[in-house]
Image: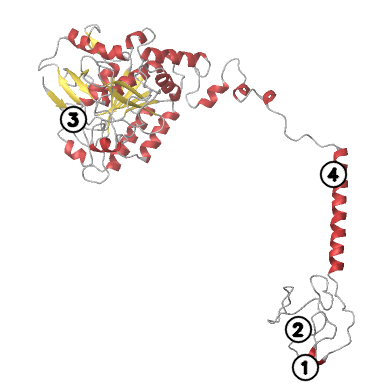
Amino acid sequence: MLSATAPRRACRATAIALTTALGLVTALAFGAAPARADAVRDAQMWVLDALNVPAAWSVTQGQGVTVAVIDSGVNPDVSDLAGSVTTGPDYTGVSTPPSNPNWGVHGTWMASLIAGHGHDGGGSGIIGVAPKSHVLSIRVITDNTDPNYSLYQHEPQARIQRELARAILYAVSHGAQVISMSLGYALPSLPVRSALQDALNHNVVIVASSGNSGEIQAARSKGYAPYSFPADYPGVLGVAAIGQDGQPARFSSDNISVQVAAPGVNVPAQGRDGQYWLVSGTSPACALTAGVAALIRSAYPGLTPEMVRQAITSTASNRPRGGYDDEVGFGTVDAAAALSAAARLSARGLAGPGSPRTGLRRTVLLTPGVSADSHFGGGPAAVPPPPVTPRGLQRLLVFCVLAAVCLAVIVIAASRLVLMRRPVHVAGYRGPAPGGGVAGSPYGGQQPGAGHGPGQHAAPQRLPWPATPPGRHTVPEDGQDASGAGE
């Protein structure tokens, strides 16, 4: 078989590296000439069965939904996408024309997995997960075989991510209900983050590949793969890749941006040349999951993006031990089960076709037959009584009497303290003694304040405690009262 490599991009000119989730996508042609159509469909059935897609088609095939494929461009003229593609702007900044055979290689593969409808009556060729959906193609990256790939690769990372933000805003303003991004960047971007929030505010479901860095040295040394954006932004459904055996692909990034997994090893797809290819990577896994989101959005357009993600993640099959791991997230996407979960969410009245397009708060208020108060602990009837009972006049009087008693106690205590601090007159005072002492003073012949001239004495002082009786108090040699009161 022939082999080719799908687009990889990295910003080599700066220390801030740019990586894409389509970096390790491998494509294997069925042969030099187009394969027989029935062989293509037969080869594709394991993918559809792994996602339980045929059972979901009894409910919807994605009619009425536009999926924005933000990628390297989509050839709208290939047999299995004819009439299902609208071509949007090219934000790559390079001049490669759509007629170039190396334009839109990766993007056409991804679009066929989402909205391919086959040919010859639909029984031949690639059939996408949502074959009646419509694709809005917006070009933001180049394939590595593009003649201007080197020029694009050396563009500043900030400019590249600003163009991605513009593509997201364009998709929202042109009616996309689902955005599929089989690409990734090593670093976050404020413009992209803002654009994604705008998409969520407009009720757009966002799906992105979690990356193909599971086997790089950094992943082996740290135990987990580097994060990839936009898969790691809040509100984005990050998708990992599994093989036909249901096991995680070795290249698939393992980190907590992974929420679910889908087939990503040797997945049949139609290329821009009209031939059929086997593609590998988290790119096809992302596109297939975006197709499931399109089915849900077609059947239950009133569900918010968070509800769509909940329907997909809560019903995943082959759930890992413990319910979650960073290789496959919550498990493998199950289209039929996800539709059933979406139906239950809609039946509960949380959302429906007539619900507002933005925000959960308003849809809650429209829940039929249920009071809005019931969403908050049962309404006023369920609110517990205040912890402090109301006080009446009688209790107020009791508190006033207690306050008056406390005030009286304070006044009495203060009065006693004032009386205790009055000057003490020592009995037996007979005037100056020789040497400047005070005869009969409690200081044993030395008056506090000594140091005055001979024959003088200081005026009596107030003491902080009652005077010591004469003859029971001595003065240390250092001139400090033995009681601790300094001179």
Circle 3 SS class: loop
Q: Which residue is mark 1?
A: 454
Q: Which residue is mark 3?
A: 97
Rendering coords of residue 114 (x, y %):
29, 18
Q: Which residue is mark 2?
A: 449
Q: CA distance from mark 3 to mark 1?
A: 118 Å
Circle nearer the N terminus (1, 4): 4
Q: Which mark is residue 255?
A: none
Amino acid bearing label 2? Gly
The answer to whether the residues at label 3 and label 1 have Cβ atoms under 8 Å apart is: no
* Image-quadrant location for residue 186: top left
Rendering coords of residue 149 (x, y %):
18, 36
Q: CA distance from mark 4 to mark 2?
A: 52 Å
* Nearest the eye: 283 or 352: 283
Please indicate whether residue 400 sits to the left or right of residue 59 in the image: right
Q: Residue at x 71, y 82 (%)?
A: 479
Q: Which mark is residue 399?
A: 4
Q: Compared to 149, does 289 lie above or below?
A: above
Q: Residue at x 84, y 78 (%)?
A: 470
Circle 1 SS class: loop
Rendering coords of residue 423 (x, y %):
85, 75
* Nearest the eye: 316 or 136: 316
